[in-house]
Image (spheres, helix red, strand yellow):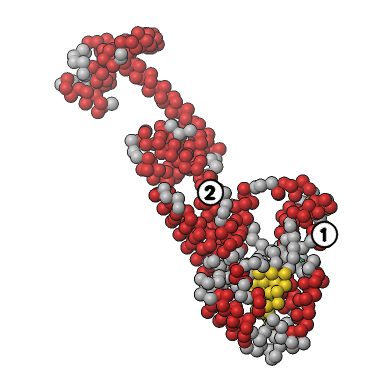
């Protein structure tokens, strides 16, 4: 739970500071309770000084109350429909008074808002009910016509000593070990804003249950993430034009800010239509970012910023008074995570494309089949070997852990393939040996010497067998055309195996021997 809510004052006594002002307010309430109508109460003061808290304490003294945020319902008609009527009629519960609370009245627009300020003026004039209004900026132009009709009470910043005392009390209740100097520093740096002081205390303490000066200094260092989170928080939590405009003045990549806002919309907003509208605003912002990129006209950023800031902010019906944990954008972490995967995919596709003479996109479309083949088929090794996949690339197709049995089988297969390859190599060498002229056409003169030596070695290996000598003789005898030399030697081997078989014409010899082979 948010500590500012947990420790929100529940009585006039619990509201710290502004003693004189509190007394004035109490008198105003008493007069209403004595059926002596009073002018509208206008509390003006900086943020986090207890104005809303005071209004809620006052509300307890009346049988009913209605609370609205003036900047939520800016048009004349809306304000008249929501509070105009209830301000001029009596309560459903007899003659008791209904308190009207209107917050952020300096947030409403004066001339160009179809009469928001005029509506308030009219309500103040006609109201038969007590009314409290709150504003931050004493000198706001929007208050010029309202101030003379109200009892204006200026709420001052909370004094550092009073803040210090309250912070220590909260820390004590929460069982936090505190350095008195740290509490003093916190009170001082909060500059009269009690909300900010309590929030900072809660954040710095976290789960550590202690507060030191060092902890405090740490959070005060400029952290870019806290800046972006603060901006995003303001967009989602506030509806005040000025506030949002300020929040959007971030020194961050605006598309990053948009991603952060988009990520946190459903965490803060609760109603479906608010979420829908907010995402529509994000899509418009995205559109303008796209236009800026494609046209290189970065003035479009201005519109994008308004859509993702003001647009998203105004998509909500009301501001939520709850604690929302903001998070970073998933889009970026997902993109980061998938970057490695994409590189791996492209590497495999490139190898397949080269080896199989297919396009990379076709290669990628074959991945699902390869995944099936690679599950428990020892063929996987052959394929991987052929394409030239390394271990990491093979792993890409093996979603499950490979059973030991399969690994052994794969190793066996691997050894078999190696053996087979060696045998093939030897067979080729032997074949070349039986057809030395064939070799002359294939080999380059520079390789000739080496090859000859190789042949000599192998010759020595093959020499001892009589069968080989026989073969050699026959090959030499059957010298006809260069073209058919290799085929003839095969044919002769064949002929030896089948002595009855008739010799076919030279032209067909090759085919016959291949066929029989
Ligand atoms: N004078 C105070 N005494 C005790 N607690 C305070 C006081 N002022 C602020 N707080 C703390 O700060 C929280 C926010 O205060 P509150 O909403 O009353 O401020 P506000 O002046 O209405 O601010 P805003 O103008 O931003 O609406 C309270 O819930 C309470 O925990």
Q: Residue at x 55, y 81 (%)?
A: 81
Q: Horizontally, is 59 left or right of 441 in the view?
A: right
N-term mark: 1 or 2? 1
Q: How many marks?
A: 2
Q: Which quadrant of the figure has residue 232? A: bottom right
Q: Would you say the beta carbon of the disc 1 residue lies within 8 angstroms of ligand 1?
A: no
Does residue 24 lie above or below 515 as drawn? below
Identify the residue at horizontal 60%, vertical 61% (top origin): 243
Q: Nearer the viewer, mark 1 or mark 2?
A: 1
Mark 2 lies on residue: 253
Residue at the spot of label 1: 161
* Residue 135 image offset from top left, x and y in percent: 66, 69
State left or right for residue 274 relative to residue 360. right
Q: Kindly state the secondary structure of the residue where label 1 is placed.
A: helix
Residue at horizontal 50 percent and vertical 39 percent from the top: 395
206 relative position to 325: left or right: right
Image quadrant where residue 500 sits? top left
The kind of secondary structure element at disc 2 is loop
CA neighbours of label 2 inside 10 A, class few (<14), some (14 to 19), many (20+): few
Image quadrant in which the C terminus is located: top left
Residue 264 shows in the view: no
x, y percent for residue 67: 65, 76
Residue 138 vs 175, above or below: the answer is below
Q: Is residue 59 left or right of residue 226?
A: right
**Do the numbered discs 1 and 2 sit on residues whose CB atoms are within 8 Å?**
no
Hey, which residue is sitting farthest bottom in the picture? 94
> Residue 457: percent from the left, percent from the top?
39, 9
Q: Residues within 10 Å of mark 1 (few under 14, many from 20)?
A: some
On screen, 205 above or below 56? above
| Residue 392 in view here | yes
Instruction: Identify the residue at image location x=65%, y=89%.
Output: 90
């Amino acid at each position: 739970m948010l500590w500012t809510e947990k420790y929100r004052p529940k009585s006039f006594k619990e509201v710290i500071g502004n003693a004189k002002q509190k007394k004035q307010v109490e008198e105003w309430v008493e007069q209403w309770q004595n059926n002596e109508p009073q002018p509208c109460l206008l509390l003006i003061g900086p943020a986090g000084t207890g104005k809303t808290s005071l209004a809620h304490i006052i509300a307890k003294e009346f049988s009913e109350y209605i609370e609205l945020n003036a900047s939520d319902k800016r048009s004349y008609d809306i304000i008249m429909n929501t509070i105009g009527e209830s301000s001029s009629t009596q309560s459903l519960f007899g003659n008791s008074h209904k308190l009207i609370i209107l917050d952020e009245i300096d947030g409403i627009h004066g001339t160009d808002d179809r009469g928001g300020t005029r509506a308030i003026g009219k309500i103040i004039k006609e109201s038969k009910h007590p009314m409290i209004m709150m504003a931050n900026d004493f000198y706001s132009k929007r208050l010029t016509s309202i101030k003379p009709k109200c009892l204006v009470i200026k709420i001052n910043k909370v004094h550092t000593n009073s803040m210090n005392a309250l912070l220590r009390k909260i820390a004590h209740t929460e069982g936090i070990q505190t350095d008195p100097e740290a509490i003093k520093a916190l009170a001082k740096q909060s500059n009269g804003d009690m909300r900010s002081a309590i929030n900072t205390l809660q954040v710095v303490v976290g789960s550590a249950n202690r507060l030191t000066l060092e902890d405090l200094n740490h959070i005060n260092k400029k952290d870019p993430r806290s800046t972006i989170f603060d901006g995003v928080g303001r967009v989602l939590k506030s509806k005040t034009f000025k506030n949002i405009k300020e929040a959007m003045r971030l020194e961050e990549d605006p598309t990053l800010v948009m991603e952060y806002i988009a990520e946190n919309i459903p965490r803060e907003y609760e109603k479906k239509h608010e979420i829908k509208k907010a995402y529509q605003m994000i899509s418009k912002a995205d559109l303008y970012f796209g236009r800026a990129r494609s046209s290189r006209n970065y003035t479009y950023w201005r519109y994008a910023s308004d859509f993702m800031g003001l647009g998203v902010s105004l998509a909500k019906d009301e501001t939520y008074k709850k604690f929302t944990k903001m998070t970073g954008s998933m889009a970026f972490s997902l993109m980061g995570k998938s970057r490695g995967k994409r590189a791996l995919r492209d590497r495999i596709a490139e190898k397949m494309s080269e080896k199989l003479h297919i396009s990379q996109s076709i290669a990628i479309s074959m991945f699902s089949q390869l995944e099936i083949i690679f599950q428990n088929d020892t063929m996987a090794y052959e394929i991987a070997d052929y394409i030239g996949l390394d271990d990491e690339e093979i792993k890409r197709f093996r979603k499950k852990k490979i059973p030991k049995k399969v690994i052994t089988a794969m190793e066996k297969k691997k050894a078999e393939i190696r053996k087979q390859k060696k045998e093939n190599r030897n067979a080729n060498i032997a074949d070349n040996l039986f057809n030395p002229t064939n070799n002359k056409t294939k080999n380059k003169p520079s390789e000739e010497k080496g090859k000859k030596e190789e042949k000599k070695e192998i010759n020595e290996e093959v020499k001892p067998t009589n069968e080989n000598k026989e073969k050699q003789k026959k090959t030499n005898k059957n010298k006809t055309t260069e073209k058919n030399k290799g085929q003839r030697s095969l044919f002769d081997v064949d002929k030896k195996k089948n002595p009855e078989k008739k010799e076919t014409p030279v032209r067909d010899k090759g085919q016959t021997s291949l066929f029989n082979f």
